């Protein structure tokens, strides 16, 4: 059974428990303890209780319940995975593995220059000076709810500094430009509506 299906089932069981009336924090704690015994992860249990809290808050505003008993139950502690940085050998191995991918150059910029994904996706042709060997990131791509991917200015002037462009990065960006021309010819009228993007997609998006 998929996680999203189980998540929905847990939510329904909790809501039925509350709707029966007379449900207090003890019953919700018992339910959460059952999930823990079933080895449901802390992050999933956190979401279950968070959604229940939000649902009961709405119910209180509609005067369907008099209090939010879920607020009296402690949220599960979720340990954030800080991760570990790749060493040089691992980074090289990854870049070799994605060598044939259309976004290989984007992976190079992230690993070699330390750019954020939004900054890499916002990079335009006019931001890159191959002859001078530098580039100036001024845009970023972000996803807005109900809109999709949008191009925005970087938040601070320091983020728009002129940065050196290593020869290796310049080479893969040149290869990317050649590939993009081929993609544009194949896509024809379906090419990305935002002109000049380094990572324009054949599916009319900016990535």
Image: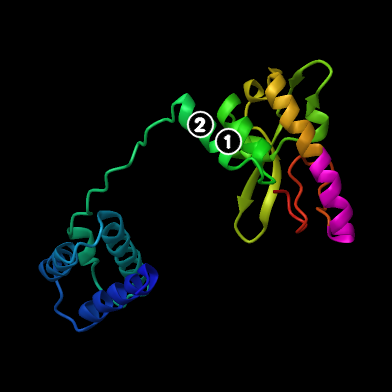
Depth check, front residue: 20 or 47: 47
- Depicted 172 relative to depicted 44: above or below: above
**Left or right position of 66 against 172:** left
Depth check, front residue: 156 or 102: 102
Tell me the quarter of the picture where residue 41 sits. Answer: bottom left
- The quadrant of the picture occupied by the N terminus is bottom left
- Depicted 20 relative to depicted 159: above or below: below
State the image coordinates of residue 128 (x, y, percent, origin top left).
Answer: 78, 27
Depth check, front residue: 41 or 153: 41
In the displayed orientation, state which residue is furthest to the bottom. Answer: 20
**Left or right position of 197 against 113:** right
Is residue 54 within the magenta segment? no
> Residue at 86% across / 45% down in the picture?
181
Q: Give the range drawn in magenta.
A: 178-190
Disc 1 is placed on an element classified as helix
The image's mark for residue 95 is 1
State the image coordinates of residue 42 (x, y, percent, origin top left).
Answer: 25, 55
CB atoms at circles 1 and 2 under 8 Å apart?
Answer: yes
State the CA–CA distance, disc 1 to disc 2: 6 Å
Q: Within 10 Å of the Cα at label 2, are there few (<14), some (14-19), or many (20+) other Cα atoms?
A: some
State the image coordinates of residue 34 (x, y, percent, origin top left).
Answer: 15, 68
């Amino acid at each position: 059974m998929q996680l999203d299906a189980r998540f929905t089932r847990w939510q329904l069981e909790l809501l039925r428990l509350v709707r029966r009336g007379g449900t207090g924090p003890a019953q919700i704690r018992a339910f959460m303890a059952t999930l823990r015994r079933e080895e449901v992860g802390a992050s999933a249990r956190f979401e279950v209780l968070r959604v229940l809290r939000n649902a009961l808050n709405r119910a209180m505003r509609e005067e369907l319940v008099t209090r939010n008993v879920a607020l009296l139950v402690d949220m599960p502690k979720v340990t954030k995975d800080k991760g570990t940085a790749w060493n040089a050998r691992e980074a090289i191995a990854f870049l070799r593995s994605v060598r044939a991918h259309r976004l290989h150059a984007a992976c190079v910029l992230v690993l070699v220059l330390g750019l954020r994904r939004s900054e890499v996706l916002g990079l335009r042709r006019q931001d890159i000076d191959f002859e001078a060997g530098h580039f100036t990131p001024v845009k970023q791509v972000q996803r807005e709810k109900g809109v999709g991917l949008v191009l925005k200015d970087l938040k601070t002037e320091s983020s728009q500094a002129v940065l050196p462009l290593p020869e290796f990065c310049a080479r893969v960006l040149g290869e990317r430009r050649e590939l993009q021309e081929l993609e544009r010819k194949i896509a024809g009228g379906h090419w990305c509506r935002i002109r000049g993007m380094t990572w324009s997609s054949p599916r009319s998006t900016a990535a």
